Image: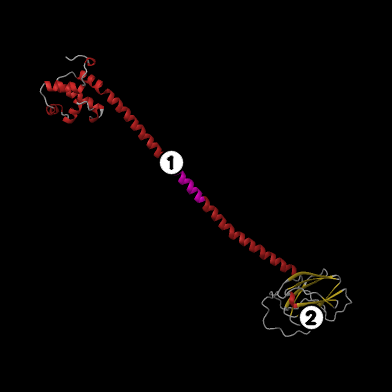
Amino acid sequence: MTGPVAETKESVGEFFRQVRETKGLTLDEVAIKTRIHPEYLKALEDSNFSKLPEQVFAKGFVRSYARSLGLDEDDAMRRFTVSAGTFYEKHEERERLRQQQAEDERKRKANRKAVIAAAGVAVLGLVLLLTREQGSVSVMRPDADAARAKTAREADRRARTETAPADHAAKPQTSAPAAAAPIQSGKPSSLPTPPTTSDPLAGLPFDVGASTEAGLVLTLEASVLSWVVVQTDDASPHEALLRPGDRLTWKAQEKFALTIGNAGGIRGELNGKPLAPFGPKGRVVRDIVITR
């Protein structure tokens, strides 16, 4: 009967070796009896616990080895606890650290994936936002251009309406235009297209034989094809297409308001006195006011 573990200095492995050799047994013979691989038995005798499997299996080896040698299993287990306790405590600590590191690494990977996913969602959201903004700008630009073009057309139409005759049905009291020279073939390239009318000279209150009995007498003579709009005092404006050589006269009490489609092609006289040139050829001049 062996004494208490505290009184022995040898490890459990040394104790097993001494008993095995005393009984004249080899490791192979013990391996056959215990069905434990000889390498594990040798590692146990050498106290090389790192080569043994997990602690629960190592304890099973100790019980089987002690049983095969006829030793007290509980005594052998106490020796094993004393001999291998420090190793397995450190081993368990290392295992806890390893598991903790593995868990930390798993969390870091999960966090990286979450950050990458969040960044991807943010980038995708930004791309969609920019795409929507660009689409809105692309839609707004044609709308803005169309609105500007429409505004320009409306302004031009209003300007033409303001200068067009207010009452085409009104006929002049006299209609005796001066003898007109033959119409030149072709129109000057810079001349604006005059409004279309069945009778270019319709609605003109002119009088070739007018004298200075009225307050103001305006005479316009065309040197090239020209379009004019004449308003006498506050009456409605009237338009005329003057061919080269045409000479027309209007009467007014206070003023005349003119719009000339080819300013350089019209010469004017007020009460028989020449007026200053209205502008260069091909230029449309509006809001010419002639008073006393």
Q: Observer-nearest residue: 132 or 113? A: 113
Q: Label 2's element? A: strand
Q: Is residue 173 above or below residue 135?
A: below
Q: Position of residue 111 (x, y in %)?
A: 42, 39
For label 2, the residue is 247
Q: Position of residue 165 (x, y in %)?
A: 76, 71
User: In the rendered view of the protein, which quadrant contains the C terminus?
Assistant: bottom right
Q: Measuring 64% from the left and 61% from the top, which residue is drawn there?
A: 148
Tag 2 and tag 1, C-beta contact below 8 Å: no
Q: Position of residue 10 (x, y in %)?
A: 20, 20
In whole angstroms, how far apart are the C-alphas of marks 2 and 1? 90 Å
For label 1, the residue is 114
Q: Is residue 271 above or below residue 14?
A: below
Left or right relative to 89: residue 22: left
Would residue 37 be seen by someone viewing this image from the given angle? no
Amino acid at pointer 2: Arg
Residue 291 position by quadrant: bottom right
55 drawn magenta:
no
Q: Residue furthest front?
A: 9
Most common secondary structure along the magenta stretch: helix
Q: Label 1's element? A: helix
